[in-house]
Image: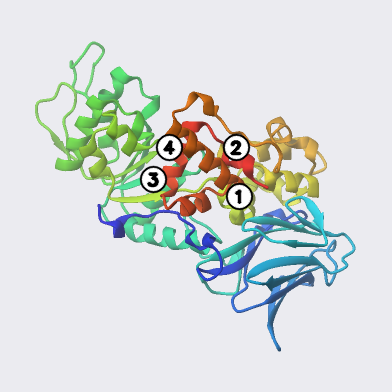
Amino acid sequence: MDPSRTITQTHEGRSGPGKGQPYLFLTLRCDRPLEGGARFSFQGADQVNIGRGSALQLERQQGETTSIRISVPDGRMSSRHARLQRVLGAWVIEDADSKNGTFVDGKRVTSSPLADDALVELGHSFFVFREALPRAEPALLEQRALKPLPRGMATLSPAFAVELERLTAFARSQVPVLVSGETGTGKELIASAIHELSGRPGPFVAVNCGAIAPNLVESELFGYRKGAFSGALEDRPGLVRSSEHGTLLLDEIGDLPLAAQAALLRVLQENEVLPVGGTRPVKVDLRVVAATHRDLAALAAQDRFRRDLLARLDGARISLPALRERREDFGLILSALMEKTAGEMARDVIFSPDAARTLLLHSWPLNVRELEKCIASAVLLARDRRVELEHLRESLLNAPKPGGPPRQGIAPEGLREPDRRLREQLIELLRANGGNVTAVARAMGKARTQVQRWLRRFDIDPGSFIR
């Protein structure tokens, strides 16, 4: 496959100084959660001062060194609250004798080095520090300034924004798209966005391949003729033909039986469908998007997925990051979910710092889907519209805390020597990089998807290594 046609969410800039620029993302304001987030670029600066202001602002000051002043309308922040400085190539945060203190990853600090993806808490505002991401303008970008896009495609991350722009270009073509990602990362939303951007006049039809009984897959997908089998009392077009002139999403394509895969290959190759019981194929005009949380290449190597079908589906590819890997967008996602689940009620909802901190430090194994359920129940339980720690789902309150014992999965005694060494290497790198899978992949010189396959194989939870 031509690498130029592959779309992946790699976060290239996480490698450190010299390969991008640092950013600070305002990801959640407890008293203004619907305002979402903002992005501040540190480009060219050696010092960043953060404090209370009348409005969200970034001011660049030129002197012996270039410094930046970030102002946030947070009454719990001091006018001079914290200072970030570049020291020997790394960034260090210092509390500026603030009234309410400076916290990093939930711990109060007076001075502390900042690791990539560190959570910084100042007053009732939470920030995520990113060490090195691709350069992007403007220096201050607020969520409300993002251009209108289909649901699921908004981001403040300059790295993910580049990938989504590439996806937009592919959306206007006939090239099939393969969307991969963990359960709950928004694969169907992205597929729907591709359809909306394509301008195709037909419908968007989503099919969960894993939810159809194996003996009904072909008749459900490709339709059938009257009398084809017992109970076939009339002609049915099937889901593929129902998406005529539109887009067909084949969700969890890895669960499609091999027999149905062969018939689907014909659809992609010949643009035609042969209904069950039919003798003549029917021409179809549709765009196919496939989605999966499984490793299709590994399934193909085990002869559980057709290689020729994978080659057809793999026209362009996007791998959606897990929620724990895109905390810079947490406020943006949270505000959208609040409006979706709470409607007008969301305007009055605020969060206690303890609740906000718990949300931001949770590893979210089920991703956005889990967050949506958590927010829906929390808003209903918060009768005074203030979400407290007690209103969060029990799974969050009982989850391992960052810095606690990580889940290391399969015991090494049951593994062969090469697998044991690989497992130990993964755990060591996860511990060194705070559970950042992208950083681990870069250190190993492997693709992030390969590292994720190994983690699933050894039952290692990267979220439990978050510091």
**Which label was assigned to residue 293?**
4
Quadrant of the rendered structure where residue 261 is? top left
User: Where does label 3 land, which residue?
Assistant: 179
Circles 1 and 3: CB distance less than 8 Å? Answer: no
* Near-viewer residue (257 or 34): 257
Which callout, 4 or 2, points at the residue further toward the start of the chain? 4
- Give the residue displayed 13% in from the left and 25% down from the top: 278
The residue drawn where x is 57% and y is 52% is 326
What residue type is disc 2 on? Glu
Mark 2 and mark 3: Cα distance apart in space: 20 Å
| Figure label count | 4
Kindly identify which residue carries mark 1.
432
Q: Residue at x 62, y 56 (%)?
A: 117
Quick one: SS at disc 3?
Answer: strand
Farthest top residue in view: 230
Q: Is residue 304 above or below residue 332?
A: above
Rounded to the nearest whole Å, what is the CA distance between mark 4 and mark 2? Answer: 16 Å
